Image (cartoon, rainbow, N blue to C red):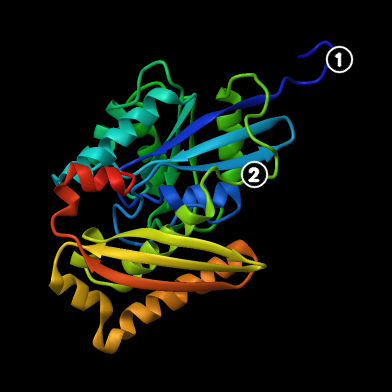
């Protein structure tokens, strides 16, 4: 308690980590109350560390969404994404380890092994709403508790919003005392250019098959304000001409659908009209090219 009897303000960085496809980005968006991280049903949708900020009376959470730690596929891109996860774990005050309520696998344990012993870990056991056998949850929670000492274990559903208040309360207990790091109305430290690129990339993940999304990235060539209108010019880079053809579709129809859907989402996010123009370009081998990855912000 402070001298006036009020509880001290708590604030800190909270990494959200887990293997691919456990619902980390959905959880971040639910916790923050806004879509600051893109989502899809495909693993490895998140490629950047995304900060989501939640301010509540007496506390501020600075959530860091990280890429899913990848143990199967090897490329310079995935090596950089894994490095991003490791760095995040060394720089935060609390870790939220997200696991699927259905099962714990070796890839989950590999992520947990990366967390320094000094960092408090709160376990978010996600997707409990989808469990066919609810009686299996208690022994599963007991199995998780045996892995190491945790600050708390909270069953949640990021999709439904179940138990998220309890999760926030448990995270807050582990936050250090200190002043807020951001203004209370901030939701993310990412700018509109970054969010525009991510929204386009999200639609590629949602609308295309297995190969193209993982070979594609999005860059913003120009971002202009004309009164309330935002004029955005973007390029999608793929590795092969065949991928470009798939992405464009017959007569460019598929790319037009991707751009149109992304534009509508951006208008909702930014609260005003958006003009979005997207070009598709081939950049051979960009996922294995350190120079290209540097220029693309990975």
Instruction: Between label 1 and label 2, give the one nearer the viewer.
Output: 2
Which residue corresponds to the image point at 66% horizontal and 29% vertical from the top-left?
180
The residue where tag 2 is placed is 186
Residue 172 has which mark?
Answer: none
Find out whether the residues at labels 1 and 2 contact each other: C-beta distance under 8 Å.
Answer: no
Q: Quadrant of residue 67?
A: top left
Rate crowding at label 2 as few (under 14), some (14 to 19) or many (20 or more) other CA atoms within 10 Å.
few
Locate the C terminus and report the quarter of the image it occupies: top left
Name the one closer to the observer, 35 or 31: 35
Name the one closer to the observer, 124 or 195: 195
Identify the element where label 2 is drawn. Answer: loop
Name the one closer to the observer, 27 or 152: 27
Q: Where residue 119 sits in the image (x, y, percent)? A: 43, 21
Q: Where residue 23 sits in the image (x, y, percent)? A: 40, 51
Which residue corresponds to the image point at 78% horizontal and 13% vertical from the top-left?
2
Residue 4 has which mark?
Answer: 1
- 1 or 2: tag closer to the N-terminus: 1
Which residue corresponds to the image point at 53% horizontal and 50% vertical from the top-left?
191
Question: Is the residue 222 above or below the residue 259 in the image?
Answer: above
Q: Quadrant of residue 220?
A: bottom left
Rate crowding at label 1 as few (under 14), some (14 to 19) or many (20 or more) other CA atoms within 10 Å.
few
């Amino acid at each position: 308690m402070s001298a006036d009897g009020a509880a001290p303000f708590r604030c800190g960085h909270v990494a959200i980590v887990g293997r691919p496809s456990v619902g980390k980005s959905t959880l971040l968006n639910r916790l923050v109350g806004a879509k600051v991280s893109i989502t899809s049903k495909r693993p490895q949708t998140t490629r950047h560390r995304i900060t989501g900020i939640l301010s509540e009376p007496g506390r501020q959470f600075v959530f860091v969404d990280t890429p899913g730690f990848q143990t199967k596929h090897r490329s310079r891109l995935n090596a950089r994404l894994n490095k991003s996860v490791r760095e995040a774990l060394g720089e935060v005050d609390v870790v939220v380890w997200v696991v699927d309520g259905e099962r714990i696998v070796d890839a989950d344990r590999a992520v947990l092994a990366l967390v320094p012993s000094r960092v408090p870990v709160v376990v978010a056991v996600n997707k409990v709403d989808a469990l066919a056998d609810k009686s299996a949850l208690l022994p599963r929670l007991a199995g998780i508790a045996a892995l190491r000492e945790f600050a708390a274990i909270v069953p949640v559903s990021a999709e439904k919003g179940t138990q998220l208040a309890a999760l926030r309360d448990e995270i807050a207990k582990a936050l250090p005392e200190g002043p807020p790091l951001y203004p209370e109305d901030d939701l993310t430290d990412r700018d509109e250019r970054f969010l525009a690129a991510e929204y386009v990339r999200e639609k590629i993940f949602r609308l295309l098959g297995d190969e193209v999304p993982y070979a594609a990235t999005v860059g913003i060539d120009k971002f202009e304000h004309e009164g309330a209108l935002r004029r955005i010019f973007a390029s999608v880079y793929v590795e092969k001409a065949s991928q470009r053809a798939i992405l464009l579709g017959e007569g460019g129809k598929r790319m037009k659908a991707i751009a149109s859907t992304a534009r509508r989402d951006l208008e909702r996010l930014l609260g005003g009209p958006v003009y979005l123009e997207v070009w598709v370009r081939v950049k051979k081998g960009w996922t294995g090219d350190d120079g290209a990855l540097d220029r693309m912000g990975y």
